[in-house]
Each structure stands twice: as C-alpha cells, then as structure tokens.
Image (spheres, coloured by chain):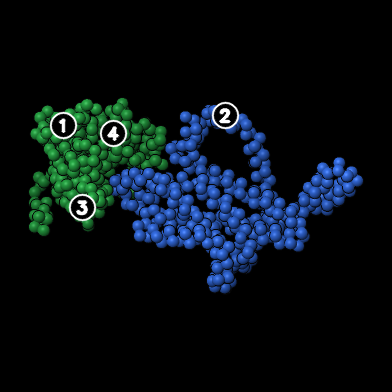
Chain colours: A green, B blue
C-alpha cells in the first residue's frame, strides 16, 4: 500500500521523469509466469531494443504497454498516466502508443490509404479529406506514396509492414512499439522496413523494439535489454551487451544468435 | 474490377469461349420470365384499373387454340399406334401450354407474395442475424443467450413455428384489428405473420453462417484495430464485419435459396403464395402434373435470379485477397 502511495506522489513530482516507466510487472497465463517483476524506464527519444529467447516475455511486455494484455500486478506510466489503472481508458492510451505487429495485421479489406485513414477517422474524428491527406503524407514518409490504392494482398510483406508503421505513426504516438516487425519477412524484404525504422530513430521517436535484427540494434538502439524467463537479465548500451556483457547468460544468447 | 485482370488466364479463356451460348440463353430466359411477371403485375394492378389491356386476371393469350391443337394432334396420334407416341407427347406439351395460359395470371400474383415474403424476411432476418452472430463470438456471458435462440429456432420445425405464431399466439387477432391490414392491396394478417416467422427462422440460420465467417477472420485484425485505438465495437464494425460479410456471401446465398422454397410453408397458414395457389387450382382441375411442373419452373426462375443477384453482389464487393478475387488468384497460380 505504501509503495503505491509513493508511486502516486512521485509520478507527479518531477518533470524529468521518464516518458515510459514500467514498474515491477507481473503476468502469468495460468500456471506459466511470463513476466516476473520487470521494471524498465524509457526516456523520451530512447530506442530500447528488447532481446531474449522465445518465450522470455518480450512480446507480452509490449502487449502490456498498450494494454492489449492486462497485467496481474505492477504499473506502467506513460508520462504521469497509469496505463494499467482500471479507470484509464485503454483506447486513449493506444492512440498515444503505436504498435507494429510481427504478423502485420493490415486491415485486409482496405487499401493502404484506408488502413491509415481508419484510425484518423474513427478515433481522431478527422473528416475524410483531412484524413486522406494525412494518410497520403504518412505513406509518403514510409516510401509508399505510389501504393496508396493497393490492397494488402497486392503488396509485398515489406510494403505491408511499412503501411503498418504508417498506420501507427498517423495517430501521432508518443511511443512506438515494434513486435518483431521483420520476423515474418524474407531478409531482402526487411531492409525497407529497417530503413523506415532507422529514419524514425533519426527523427527522435521513442521506440521499444523487440527484434532479432542485430544490425538495427547496433545502429539505432540507445539501450538493449536482455530478457530471459520473464526477468531482465541485463540492460545497457549496445556496445556493452554486444562486446562485454556482464552476465554469462547474455553472452551465451548473443553467441547463439550470431550463428543464425 | 480486379477480376478483369484474370481474363487472360487459361481458365478464363476456357470459360468465355465454351460458355457463350449459355449466358445468352440465360439472359433470354431471364428477360422472358421477368418480362412476363412484371407485365402481368402492371396489367393486373395498374392498367386494368384504368381500363387498358385485357383486365385483371384475364389471360393475355386465349387458350382455346392450344386446346384445339392438342385435341387434333391427339386424334392423329391415336390412329398411328406406337409410331404415334412422339406425336402424342406433342399433344401433351400443347395441353400443358393451354393449362399454363390459364394458370399464369394466378401464378404471377402468387409469385409476388413469394418474392416479397422471401426478400423482406431475408433482409429483416439479416439485421437480427448480424448482432446475434457478433454476440455468439464476442458476447461474453450473452453468448449463451444467442446460442439458446439459435438452437431453439434451428431445432424446431419451421411449420410448427408458423403454427404457433398464427394459431397459438393472439398475434393474428391483434393484426386483424391493426389499421390498414387487409385493406386494398395491403395483405391480410397471415402474410405479416409469415414474415415474422420467416424473419425469426431465417435470422437463426443466417446468424450461423455469419458466425462461421466471423470466426474465419483472423483475430489479429481486431487486435490491430484495437491497437490503433478503436473500441471493440468499432473494431468489429469497421474491420471485422466488412470482411466477415464478404466471406459469408456464398453461404448466405444458400439461405436465400432455401427460404424462397421454404416460403411455401406459408400456404399452411393461408398466405396465397405460389404453392398455395398452385395446389388450390390443382385440387379443382386435377391437372397435378402440369400445374406442379409449372410451379417448379416459376420457383426455378426466382431461385436462379436470386443466385445471379447474389453472384453480382459478391463480385461487386470483392476485394483483392478477400472472397472471390482470392479464389481466382489462386486459380491462376
């Protein structure tokens, strides 16, 4: 009880508080504990890459951040709003937190432009013309200005994922979550997606990225968090985790994925 | 539409060359069928009132010549023995035409009931079926309510449902007292009860078809909608349902076809639709074979038209990757 009271007082206290603050997150599915006390601070402009073996809880952590999954206990603050609080409207949170999925999930019945427009129209309440213009801009930004009228089935995997990014960006999110955005793509198709992500890093977007793309992690990340078995094993700047990890398990993990 | 780009495929070419006389004949048959129905309705309800044309319910063509022809052909065949058999069949055809001429006005009027009964019930049922199906899949505890409704309706005979509505409930009495019911060209209460019955019955079946389609939409679609900030309701409405309904069209067509024929059960609560009128006339004339044969032709005309219409709708709303366009694409590969 006292813990949560200090949380409440501290969250309004300072302006230098991190943009996204994850505190002691626990989540289990049945008997299986997926997250076991994860805490993580993300400053504005940070690009945090989450790595770890499959089943380590990376994706669950992301899904908790925009409340696609409800946590068992713990808190996630976006600015000074407790995302997990019962009286927080998840739809408000999700506008501020963009999400890009491994299996992309473009709305299959809508063109690229309408995929981007849907949230603008139905969530932000923009009129058709304004939404259309904004969608065109966002698709231009990800290099698909010439594909606005294509349906998902007519786009390559990489193009689809870029539409997925544009769809999330159009909502003007504070934070972007990427859940293995290139894992479902052929290697040659993922470069376009990685370029767009690198461009976002340039622009100073705050990003939380689950990926096995170590090129991206080396080039763009401000920090890397290694998760295993629902816990953070080690966290630090990319050089440290790649070159000089403190934990044996971290070293083993990076060794194993470098063989892939 | 996107389907057009597949015309160069081997299957496409095969279809266009081999099927050419088919569509032409189908169009001709369709024009003849609907031309007759619409002319008949126009004549009976509009022209006859202002004194134009042969009058309401009167034959367009006299049957006398066909009867005479049938009789003389039969005479000829009678003298020829076994050799005359084909000629005798011609006589049968001629007398069937004569019966058809007599029957046509009544069938056209009855077809109107069948068509209105079916289409209104399907449309009303659809608006019940969609929320019902959504409830079945996303309704949480309300799931059971939707399930109970569906199983109750699907698990009991349609005829029994109609009897309960017509004889069991005081519905018919209320409707009888309702303003306008049964006056002028507005049908009697039995018709309205049939619509209620078919709507309820059809809604349960349609809900099952839609539920199946609903479950075939990837759940990532709704997740993505929610991740953008759409509420569950909006996500279902703008993302899941538009895909669902496209998937559901083939099965839905099936339900339309069924209901067209099942609407004949309305005869048992005295609605003067196709079956009622046909069996009534057959009972008076004893021309069962000819009359029910002709009845079948009228049903067939309505059913084929409905199928064709649904086909149109399906390709109209097809989107690359969903429904028809997807099938064609796979066929080309």
Image location of residue B182, percent across then percent down: 62, 68
The residue depicted at 45 percent of the width and 61 percent of the height is B149
Image mark 4: chain: A
| A118 relative position to B37: left or right | left
Q: CA distance from mark 1 to mark 4?
A: 21 Å
SS at badge 4 = loop
| A145 relative position to A252: left or right | right
Which is more foreground, mark 2 or mark 1?
1
Depicted A156 relative to depicted B207: above or below: above
Q: CA distance from mark 2 to mark 4?
A: 40 Å
Whichever of labels 1 and 4 marks the residue nearer the N terminus, that label is: 4
User: Which is more toward the observer, A100 or B52?
Assistant: A100
Query: Which residue matches tag 3?
Result: A72
Q: Callout 3 environment at 10 Å: few (<14), some (14 to 19), or many (20+)?
A: some
Q: Callout 2 environment at 10 Å: few (<14), some (14 to 19), or many (20+)?
A: few
Please give the label number shown on residue A183. Answer: 4
Image mark 1: chain: A
Residue B117, by quadrant, is bottom right
Q: CA distance from mark 2 to mark 1?
A: 59 Å
Same chain, marks 2 and 1? Answer: no
SS at badge 2 = helix
User: Which is more toward the observer, A67 or B27?
Assistant: A67
| Labelled pair 3, 1 in contact (Cβ < 8 Å) | no
Query: Which residue matches tag 1?
Result: A252
Q: CA distance from mark 3 to mark 4?
A: 28 Å
Q: Is residue A220 visible?
A: no
Q: Callout 4 environment at 10 Å: few (<14), some (14 to 19), or many (20+)?
A: some
Query: Which residue matches tag 2?
Result: B13
User: Which is more toward the observer, A56 or B12?
Assistant: A56
């Amino acid at each position: 009880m006292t813990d949560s009271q200090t949380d409440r007082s501290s969250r309004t206290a300072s302006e230098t508080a991190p943009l996204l603050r994850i505190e002691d997150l626990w989540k289990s599915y049945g008997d299986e504990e997926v997250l076991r006390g994860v805490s993580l601070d993300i400053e504005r402009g940070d690009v945090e890459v989450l790595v770890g073996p499959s089943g380590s809880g990376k994706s669950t952590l992301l899904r908790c951040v925009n409340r696609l999954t409800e946590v068992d206990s713990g808190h996630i603050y976006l600015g000074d709003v407790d995302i997990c609080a019962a009286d927080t409207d998840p739809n408000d949170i999700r506008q501020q937190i963009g999400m890009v999925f491994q299996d992309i999930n473009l709305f299959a019945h809508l063109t690229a432009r309408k995929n981007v427009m849907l949230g603008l129209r139905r969530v932000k309440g923009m009129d058709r013309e304004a939404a259309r213009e904004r969608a065109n801009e966002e698709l231009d930004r990800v290099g698909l200005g010439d594909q606005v009228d294509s349906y998902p089935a007519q786009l390559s995997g990489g193009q689809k994922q870029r539409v997925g990014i544009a769809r999330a960006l159009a909502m003007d999110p504070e934070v972007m979550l990427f859940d293995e955005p290139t894992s479902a793509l052929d290697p040659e198709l993922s470069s376009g997606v990685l370029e767009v992500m690198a461009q976002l890093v340039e622009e100073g977007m705050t990003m939380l990225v689950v990926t096995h793309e170590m090129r991206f992690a080396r080039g763009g990340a401000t920090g890397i968090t290694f998760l295993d078995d629902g816990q953070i094993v080690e966290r630090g700047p990319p050089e440290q985790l790649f070159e000089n990890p403190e934990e044996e398990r971290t070293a083993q993990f990076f060794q194993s994925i470098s063989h892939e | 539409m996107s389907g057009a780009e597949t015309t160069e495929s081997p299957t496409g070419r095969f279809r266009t060359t081999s099927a050419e006389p088919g569509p032409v004949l189908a169009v001709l048959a369709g024009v003849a069928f609907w031309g007759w129905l619409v002319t008949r309705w126009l004549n009976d309800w509009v022209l006859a009132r202002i004194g134009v044309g042969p009058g309401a319910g009167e034959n367009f063509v006299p049957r006398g010549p066909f009867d005479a022809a049938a009789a003389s052909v039969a005479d000829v065949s009678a003298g020829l023995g076994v050799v005359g058999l084909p000629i005798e069949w011609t006589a049968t055809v001629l007398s069937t035409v004569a019966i058809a001429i007599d029957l046509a006005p009544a069938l056209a009027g009855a077809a109107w009931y069948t068509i209105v009964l079916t289409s209104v019930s399907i449309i009303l049922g659809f608006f019940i079926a969609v929320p019902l199906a959504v409830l079945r899949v996303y309704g949480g505890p309300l799931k059971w309510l939707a399930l109970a409704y569906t199983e109750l309706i699907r698990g009991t005979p349609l005829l029994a449902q109609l009897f309960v509505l017509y004889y069991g409930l005081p519905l018919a009495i209320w409707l009888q007292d309702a303003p306008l019911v049964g006056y002028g060209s507005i049908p009697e209460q039995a018709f309205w009860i049939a619509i209620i019955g078919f709507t309820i019955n059809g809604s349960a079946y349609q809900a099952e078809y839609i539920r199946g389609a609903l479950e075939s939409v990837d759940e990532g679609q709704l997740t993505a909608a929610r991740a953008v900030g759409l509420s569950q309701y909006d996500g279902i409405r703008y993302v899941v349902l538009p895909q669902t309904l496209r998937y559901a069209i083939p099965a839905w067509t099936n339900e339309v076809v069924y209901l067209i024929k099942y609407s004949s059960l309305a005869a048992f609560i005295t609605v003067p639709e196709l079956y009622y009128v046909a069996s009534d006339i057959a009972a008076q004339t004893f021309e069962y074979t000819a009359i029910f044969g002709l009845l079948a032709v009228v049903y067939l005309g309505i059913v084929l038209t409905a199928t064709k219409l649904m086909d149109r709708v399906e390709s109209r709303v097809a989107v690359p990757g969903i429904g028809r366009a997807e099938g064609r694409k796979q066929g080309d590969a």
